[in-house]
Image: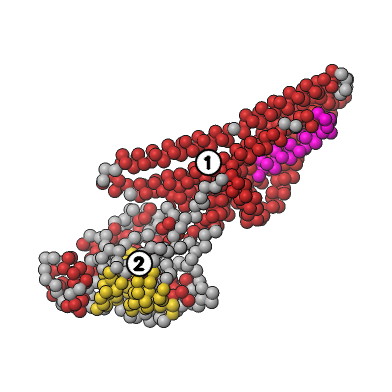
């Protein structure tokens, strides 16, 4: 199955519970482990914070019993100094813990994003066809931000609040174990509701991120296709589409907020009951002289101080579930293995002659779909120019895509200089091939950087030589900053002909022995096409070239032409031979040049066309 989506299906609560522990383990093993030393230091800081908080609660007993009741003036200065010292320790520990966990959280996200990007750069072309751009971007932004919360804020919060609760509960049991038991008798009742809230939060997060991916896809498409939106007067339609997604997001986020907020009143209610029990029982003890007012206030202070971190722990569970939902989606993407890989024992291919040979090739884009190619056999002789022509959907681009192994054949073989491309390393195979297509991929960088994409580390002289060969040097010098001019996203600041000539310069700089041209002039006007054709002729000289073109005028002087229809090669020959054969090629010729008879001699054709 070549096509698919990494998006995980909706699951019920039991599935979420089964996946939680493996997800946490993988997060720890793969991304947290390198930062254990810093997390250990952060844990020490958390212990100091918790100890300081418990010590402040413990100080309530001597404050009341020895200062307010017994009037011991000498103890006043000691207690005041202790409170100040504890405040300094807690402040320094809080700063250290915050900085350490912030560092860890940001490093984890940076590591995840780097791993994610590396994985996607090595993914198959089919993966990008199956998954919209907006959805992929959503994984890097929304999901990674949620993971940041789970990896740093939640871990820090759980660590600090849990340690604080442990210290304070220990103090309460030290003061009066029966009172502490009464106080915390009701809190286990919150465990199941909080778990249910967490599961709902994870599902709400998954639905929200799915819609967010669709929203980003819509934004990407409409911003890049703004000209077409306006040209067809579809502004209202696109606004309606965006509004539908935005409203769906609004309701999902509202539902998530309601779910998240449910934990707070639950803990408020249980906390109120616990405080009431402590006041009732502890107050009875004080009235009956079972314990001192200081001991009672120390216990109730510990409970009040423990109440806030316990509530935080309940709230943090929802954030943890959001982060784990994001982790599930991110890991699903990280687990995508490219189907196109180096075979065991693959060897380096050195392209010398550059012959390309298809032998009985059959290929379908996905299992169960109609074959795009069926029994295709053809030869591209070394150093020659071969053209593929045929109606749209005939399989021309599929043939071209099989040569650099953007896809692998289902049956048959594709060979370069006698070696099956599946037995060559991908790096060496693609190093010997240059591609120029109608889909010009220029990056929002300088002209120099876009040309140098053809060969990393090329000198300025080599870049300029390639630009001159592509008839691009003169117009580049006329740009505001010359070779340092940024071309904008997808080269939007340049004309179609200029973009294509930079693309040709990139291929010239690569200087590969095999050249693949996929509709390289189909979107150009007559003048731009004339300039680009001249550049292409210079590029094709001495190379094995396979050309796909709808405009037959651009390939009539090819050494060999294959006519493709229905995924099969139905004709082969040069222009004159195919015209005489009066088959598919001649029919296409007559459709394009309906104003004149079929001409076999190319010089006659050029004279007739002016």
Quadrant of res 189: top right
* 363 vs 159: above or below: below
Q: Nearer the viewer, residue 450 or 332?
A: 332
Asked whether residue 511 is in view, the answer is: no
Q: Which label belongs to residue 538?
A: none
Query: What's the residue at 30%, 64% (across, down)?
Result: 393
Q: Position of residue 401 (x, y in %)?
A: 38, 68
Q: Nearer the viewer, residue 408 or 104?
A: 408
Query: What's the residue at 84%, 22% (across, down)?
Result: 285
Range shown magenta: 155-179
Q: Residues within 10 Å of mark 1 (few under 14, many from 20)?
A: many
Quadrant of res 555: bottom left
Quadrant of image for the C terminus = bottom left
Tally the numbered discs. 2
Mark 1 and mark 2: Cα distance apart in space: 40 Å
Query: What's the residue at 23%, 75% (across, down)?
Result: 557
Magenta stretch mostly in which secondary structure? Answer: helix
Asked whether residue 38 is in view, the answer is: yes
Read off the residue under disc 2. Answer: 372
Read off the residue under disc 1. Answer: 204
Q: Position of residue 119 (x, y in %)?
A: 52, 60
Left or right for 337, reference 492: right
Left or right for 469, reference 15: left
Q: Residues within 10 Å of mark 2 (few under 14, many from 20)?
A: many
Q: Is residue 176 magenta?
A: yes
Q: Does the magenta stretch include residue 143?
A: no
* Residue at the limit of the structure toward the top, as seen here: 287
Q: Position of residue 136 (x, y in %)?
A: 47, 52
């Amino acid at each position: 199955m070549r096509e698919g989506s990494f998006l995980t299906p909706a699951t019920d609560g039991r599935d979420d519970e089964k996946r939680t522990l493996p997800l946490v383990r993988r997060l720890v093993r793969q991304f947290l482990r390198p930062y254990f030393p810093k997390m250990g230091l952060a844990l020490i800081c958390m212990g100091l914070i918790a100890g300081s908080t418990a010590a402040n609660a413990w100080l309530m007993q001597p404050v009341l019993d020895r200062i307010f009741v017994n009037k011991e003036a000498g103890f006043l200065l000691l207690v005041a100094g202790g409170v100040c010292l504890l405040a300094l320790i807690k402040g320094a520990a809080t700063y250290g813990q915050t900085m350490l966990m912030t560092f860890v959280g940001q490093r984890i996200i940076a590591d995840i994003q780097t791993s994610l990007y590396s994985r996607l750069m090595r993914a198959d072309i089919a993966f990008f066809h199956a998954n919209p751009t907006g959805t992929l971007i959503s994984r890097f932004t929304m999901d990674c931000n949620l993971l940041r919360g789970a990896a740093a804020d939640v871990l820090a919060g759980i660590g600090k609040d849990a340690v604080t609760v442990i210290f304070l509960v220990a103090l309460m049991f030290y003061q009066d174990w029966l009172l502490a038991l009464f106080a915390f008798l009701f809190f286990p009742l919150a465990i199941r509701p909080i778990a249910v809230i967490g599961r709902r939060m994870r599902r709400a997060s998954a639905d929200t991120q799915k819609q967010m991916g669709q929203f980003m896809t819509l934004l990407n498409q409409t911003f890049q296709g703004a000209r077409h939106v306006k040209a067809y007067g579809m502004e209202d339609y696109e606004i309606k589409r965006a509004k539908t997604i935005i409203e769906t997001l609004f309701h999902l986020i509202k539902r998530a907020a309601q779910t998240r907020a449910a934990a707070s009143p639950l803990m408020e209610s249980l906390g109120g009951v616990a405080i009431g029990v402590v006041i009732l029982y502890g107050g009875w003890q004080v009235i009956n002289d079972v314990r001192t007012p200081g001991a009672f206030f120390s216990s109730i202070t510990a409970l009040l101080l423990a109440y806030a971190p316990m509530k935080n722990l309940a709230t943090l569970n929802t954030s943890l579930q959001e982060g784990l939902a994001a982790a599930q989606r991110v890991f699903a993407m990280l687990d995508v293995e490219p189907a196109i890989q180096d075979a065991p024992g693959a060897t380096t291919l050195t392209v010398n002659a550059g012959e390309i040979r298809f032998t009985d090739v059959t290929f379908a884009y996905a299992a169960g779909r109609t074959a795009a190619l069926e029994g295709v056999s053809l030869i591209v002789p070394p150093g020659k120019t071969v053209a593929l022509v045929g109606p749209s959907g005939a399989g021309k681009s599929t043939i071209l895509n099989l040569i650099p192994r953007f896809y692998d054949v289902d049956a048959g073989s594709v060979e370069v200089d006698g070696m099956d491309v599946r037995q060559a390393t991908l790096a060496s195979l693609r190093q010997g091939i240059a591609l120029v297509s109608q889909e010009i991929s220029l990056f929002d960088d300088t002209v120099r950087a876009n040309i140098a994409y053809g060969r990393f580390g090329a000198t300025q002289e080599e870049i300029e030589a390639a630009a001159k060969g592509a008839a691009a040097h003169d117009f580049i010098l006329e740009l505001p900053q010359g070779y340092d001019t940024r071309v904008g996203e997808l080269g939007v600041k340049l004309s179609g002909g200029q973009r294509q000539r930079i693309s040709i310069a990139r291929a010239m700089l690569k200087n590969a022995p095999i050249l693949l041209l996929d509709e390289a002039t189909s979107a150009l006007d007559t003048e731009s096409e004339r300039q680009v054709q001249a550049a292409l002729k210079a590029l094709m000289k001495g190379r094995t070239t396979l050309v796909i073109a709808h405009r037959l005028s651009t390939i009539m002087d090819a050494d060999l032409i294959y006519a493709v229809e229905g995924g099969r090669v139905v004709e082969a020959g040069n222009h004159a031979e195919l015209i005489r054969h009066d088959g598919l090629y001649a029919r296409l010729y007559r459709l394009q040049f309906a104003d004149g008879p079929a001409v076999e001699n190319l010089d006659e054709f050029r004279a007739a066309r002016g």
